[in-house]
Image: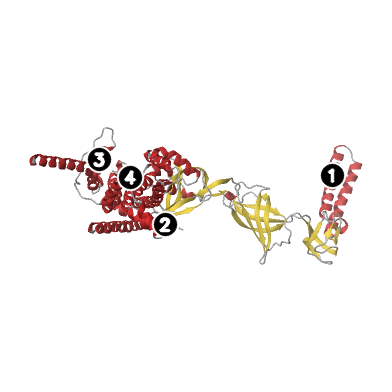
Amino acid sequence: MKKRKIVIRLTVGFLILMVVCTMLSRTVYRLMLPDVRVETPTSRSLTDPMTYSAEIGYVNTEDITAQAEWEVLSVNVQVGSEVKAGQQLMTIRSDEADVERKQLVLNQKMAQTRVNSTAGMEREQAQIDLEKADLALQKHDEIYPKDGIVVAKNDGIVSEVNCKPNQTVTGTQIRIKTAATSYCVTWELPMQNVGGFEVEDEVECVVANSEELLFQGSASISDVSVPDEMGMVTMTAAFAAQRDIYLSDAATVTMTPPSTTYETVVPRSSLQKVGDSDAIYVVNTQPSMFGDHTTVKLTAVTVLEQNNRYAAVQVKLERTDRIVVNTSKPLFDGADVKIVE
Amino acid sequence: MKKKRRFALYGKHGMLLIFSVVILLPLVYTVCNSFMATSEINHYYAGINAQGGTTAFHLIPDQFSLDSYYQVFISRPDYLMKFWVSLFLTSAIVVGQLVISVLAGYALAKFAIPFRNFFMFAIIALMMMPYQVTLVSNYIVLEKIGLLNTYWALVLPGIFSPFGVFLMRQILSTMPDSILEAAKLDGANQIQLILKIVVPSCKSGIVSLVILSFVDYWNMVEQPLIYLDDPSSYPLSVFLAHFNSSNLGLSFTCGVLAMIPVLLLFWLFENDLTKGIAFSSLK
């Protein structure tokens, strides 16, 4: 009976020792484990979007501009008026333009007379002068309204009227929006950031005033300037907007350079060099009788493309797989680790 | 005549001494070597894996070291975890086996079940088969019921042990029916009969079954290797079987760790074990 008591005490003592040792070794071991930070692989492009602030402008508008001094006699439209091609917008009188036109008509008549009255080489020269005079008059008539009547060349809606009757004006007087795509954004960027962008490529554009968002959508690049002496390039993109946008509104343009979207993209810090090839550590957590057991598995990868932050890799990974991106101690295949948030 | 008897006695003791040394030497060797430093183990057992290599017989450590014990008990929890896995699995199997064996043995010994002899024959036939024979069929069944890679795959086949049923049947068949009938007359139902009459009266048999099945499953190697895929869930017995020459020191220490529960169990129930085996007519 005494022996049995001793053995029972020994057994209990042994089990208690085992429990204490297990708890102690687990605690010590956990304290010594490398702390790792993990991330999951993503599917994405490797090019980072670039955002620039831009100035708003108008495109697809018809501007009625006084090239010389115009004396406004009447204005037949107002802001918001719908106009048709050929419709009278305003009447003007411009003495300067009248004098110039009379001179051009006179030049044309004199050239015509010379053509009729001469022969040979002189006639040929008169013929050339007549053609020049015709061209100059035609150009004048294109610039200056004939008989002081200003007409619309396209269908559209009047968006600006800057003159009143009896005013003497120069510059743009009436602006007509002729199509739905009526705005453009212009921005400057370093030449190296232009990348593969060219005319007709799309950029993301956001326009807002101090109160609300006026437009968010894609804009099509319509012009790319040559680089200036500072290496800056000016780009212009047009976009369609349903709401009225003013030049004072704020615009930003986001350019996402064209790139392949990769199935598996991992942070570049997760890449490990193993000889000449690359590898990543994938975290494997196994539930066990005594809680989760977390280890890392060295997995070989093939790097397809990389930028400063990410690398596209060829490896079979699930979206939920966790990859070590940072560790407090050197790792090896099968190493136990502790994940920190 | 006296001289002749004395010689016979000396001869008997001499033989016993030789057998004891042969049996105890591996245990003593394991315990002694577990106190060696890693460098010392590497020095004496360097040729263990080399082709044609030899190892020295080195019992007493040149320098006493607890390095292996520190590795096993403090440095890493892995070995102790394996110990607990082993203890959990073995305890679950032994408890389950005990319940099934007592009930089945009682039924076969005391009830006039149709085809009782056929069942007994089937149980003896199963008992005679090596475990490896039923390994594949068990694997297929466990796969079909989705228990592979779980501890149930080890516990369930272990619980239904033909040896336990046979042992308990043998013990209970020697129990006089009059005791049970007297208890029935006193108003005991079947549960009370089992708990208050059957179990106490075959205590030594139960202890024998506990010890024998504990040792059997404490040392199991094939079942975890076949039924479990994840090496981290293997018990200590499999872990020990996979040690290699690079960590012999740990192997000796884990050997000591694996030895202790079995020794304690034997020490605790050694009298009951001999009684139980004698009682069951297995001697």
Assign a secondary structure to mark 1. Answer: helix
Image spot of residue B52 (x, y percent): 26, 32
Rounded to the nearest whole Å, what is the CA distance between mark 1 and mark 2?
Answer: 129 Å
Instruction: Give the labeled residue for mark 3.
Output: B45
Q: Is residue B119 left or right of residue A181?
A: left
Label 2 CA crowd tier, 10 Å (few <14, some 14–19, many 20+): few
Of the residues under marks 4 and 2, which one precedes in the sequence?
2
Image spot of residue B242 (x, y percent): 34, 42
Say which of A271 and A228 sits in front: A271
Say which of A159 and A5 sits in front: A5
The disc labelled 4 sits on which kind of residue?
Leu
Q: Which mark is residue B240?
A: 4
Assign a secondary structure to mark 2. Answer: helix
Q: Which mark is residue B191?
A: 2
Q: Is residue A250 left or right of residue A137?
A: left
The disc labelled 2 sits on which kind of residue?
Ile
Image spot of residue B122 (x, y percent): 41, 40
Q: Is residue A251 left or right of residue A327?
A: right
The disc labelled 3 sits on which kind of residue?
Tyr
Q: Chain of mark 2?
A: B
Rounded to the nearest whole Å, what is the CA distance between mark 3 and mark 1?
Answer: 114 Å
Image spot of residue A106 (x, y percent): 88, 51
Instruction: Give the labeled residue for mark 1.
Output: A131
